[in-house]
Image: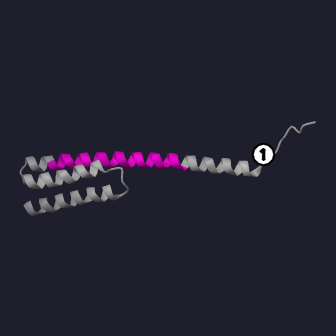
Amino acid sequence: QPHPFIMTHPIIIISSFLTTIRSTWELSHIVRKRRATKALKTEAKSTYKILQRAYRRGLLLEREFDNLFERLMRVEAHNNRKCSHYIALREVQTDFQAILAKVV
């Protein structure tokens, strides 16, 4: 007569547990990556608007604006790379602040 409770093999239990942990980690990694990409796009867009306003008010020369704008577009184009895009965005913002400090 078959036993009503069949004990599951420990290896099956452990592998199932590890699969669950890995799936959860992968999902959280995807969510973090999407949030970071969205935050970068939002910040880059905000930086672009600030650059435009400064250029229209005459605080930036055309070549300064073009240089900063080109670098900003490179940041957005490469936003799928690891932390380097944040560093590049910070550099654009820092250089912009330095240019404004010279004007004022």
Which residue lies at the image location 22% right of the left edge and 51% below the top edge? 72
Q: Secondary structure at mark 1?
A: loop
Q: In this rendering, would 94 be left or right of 58? A: right
Q: Quadrant of the N terminus?
A: top right
**Kind of residue indicated by mark 1:** Thr
Q: Residue furthest right?
A: 1
- The location of residue 13, given as percent across then percent down, is 72, 48
Q: Find out whether residue 100 is within the magenta segment.
A: no
- Residue 32 in the image: x percent, y percent? 44, 49
User: Can residue 59 be seen?
Assistant: no
User: Considering depth in this image, is 40 or 104 the residue closer to the camera?
Assistant: 40
Q: Quadrant of residue 31?
A: top left
Task: Report which residue position mark 1 lands on.
Answer: 8
Please indicate whether residue 51 sits to the left or right of residue 37 in the image.
Answer: left
Please give the name of the residue rendered at 21% of the width and 54% of the height, measured from the top-left corner: 71
Please state the total of marks drawn on the protein image: 1
Q: How is the image coloured?
A: one colour
Q: Is residue 16 toward the left or the right of residue 6 in the image?
A: left
Label 1 packing within 10 angstroms: few (<14), some (14-19), many (20+): few
Q: Main secondary structure of the magenta part?
A: helix
The image shows residue 93 at horizontal and vertical percentages of 22, 57
Res. 73 visible in picture: yes
Q: Which residues are magenta?
A: 25-51
Measuring from the top left, give residue 44's x and y in whole percent.
Answer: 26, 49
Quarter of the picture containing the C terminus is bottom left
Q: Residue placed at 30% from the left, 59% from the top? A: 87
